[in-house]
Amino acid sequence: MTLLPTELPPLPAPLPVTSPVPLFASRPVITACGLAVSGVADERDLLGGPLGITREDPSASGPGLRHKDRASRMALRAVRRALDAAAIDAPAATAVVVSSNFGNLDTVCDFTDTIAAETVTGLSPLRVPHMSSHVTAAWVAIEHGLRGPNLTLCSGTPGGLDAVFWAAALLAAGRAEVAVVVGVEPDTAPVARLHRERGGTAWLDGAVCLVVENAAHAASRGARVRAAVSGYGKATDRAEAVRQALKAYDRPIGLRVAAGRDRPGPGARAGVGPSPQDGPVLDLTGRLGRCSGALGVLQCAAALAWFDRPAWEVERSRGPVADSVLAIAGAGRDVSAEAGPGSGVRPGTGSGTRAGGAAGADGEGDPSGVSALLLTRPAPDGSGRVPS
């Protein structure tokens, strides 16, 4: 009989979440994007112009989706579109990282209603796995044969940016060759009720997926690199989160993607607001409503569209500002007040910031902290380095 050891080997040191710069030495890059969002055709629609009025209908997309919850259906559509755009047969060692705060809430509510009316005898054992808050990430892995690490984040509005960071961490640790990052929030009856109870008037119905891989892996298969993940910060206030994200970057920011007001002012390079030398500000919540856990992934999709702008439009930008996008998500101690109904890209002009408390700039009154992610335009050689 083999006895279990009385002492376990020491655990490896945790990844440096608060000092993330070394993590990006492996050059994580984004090579593709896929969306399944009501009213949005592709990532270019996120930058401006009128949104469509069509409602994304996941039930209209192929077999095998009939008994899945709405969030999982939309996520599967977004992942399929992203993998097709990446022209990649995802290897088995592909990680799945999902960010969703509401996810399968409709399924959970349905189960509790059934128990209240019929007791547990009214439940079908076949439906029990659908109650897991991790079900969307599981379906993505099962449907596409992805046997790498499988994570779900429910960390408020910063969750989407956190998901991109954890994908980069898994690649840097050698746990995966490719990662699919999904942000999804469904418009179901329980979700709508929660938003209305908290003063919401519009919210996201859809999913977005990014394909993230190391630059070397992307180069080995001749993939087009659309953006490099170059910095990340996580803190309880916006200034510190942005300072961490920009720790290894001292050039002007081409585009800020942030909810609420984000105007230039004193201490801008410390992260309180954009510098007067920076480019415009894009507020996706002004266009799509509350995006919750999908916000950060949508911000990255908008960054890809920003980098893909026509050459004549890029040439109008001031010097190097077209080479970077800073995404900020979440409320914090020094965030600005929640913006009212707005649209699209706003000029980065004005002065000062106003303290808005924890119910501020993310538009949801989310008490979680702030995450910031720096994306840079890849060099022409596709290496993922910042062009000089």
Image (tube, rainbow, N blue to C red):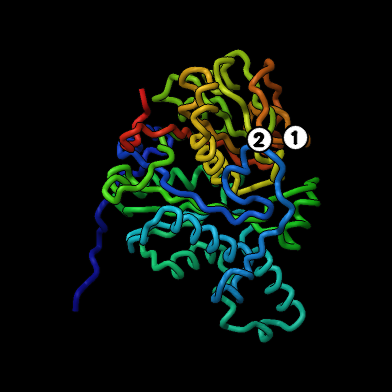
Name the residue at the top extreme: 266
Q: CA distance from mark 2 to mark 1?
A: 8 Å
Image height of 219 relative to 137, above or below: above
Image height of 176 relative to 347, above or below: below
Q: Give amino acid for label 1.
A: Gly
Q: Quadrant of residue 23?
A: top left
Q: Which residue is mark 2?
A: 283
> Where in the figure is residue 139, as x and y percent of width and height?
50, 68
> Where in the figure is residue 332, as x and y percent of width and height?
62, 32
Give the left or right position of residue 135, taking residue 14 as reference: right
Give the left or right position of residue 256, taking residue 364 as reference: left
Q: 165 and 209: which one is in front?
A: 209
Q: Residue at x 52, y 33 (%)?
A: 310
Q: Give amino acid for label 2.
A: Asp
Give the left or right position of residue 33, taking residue 7 as reference: right
Name the residue at the left extreme: 1
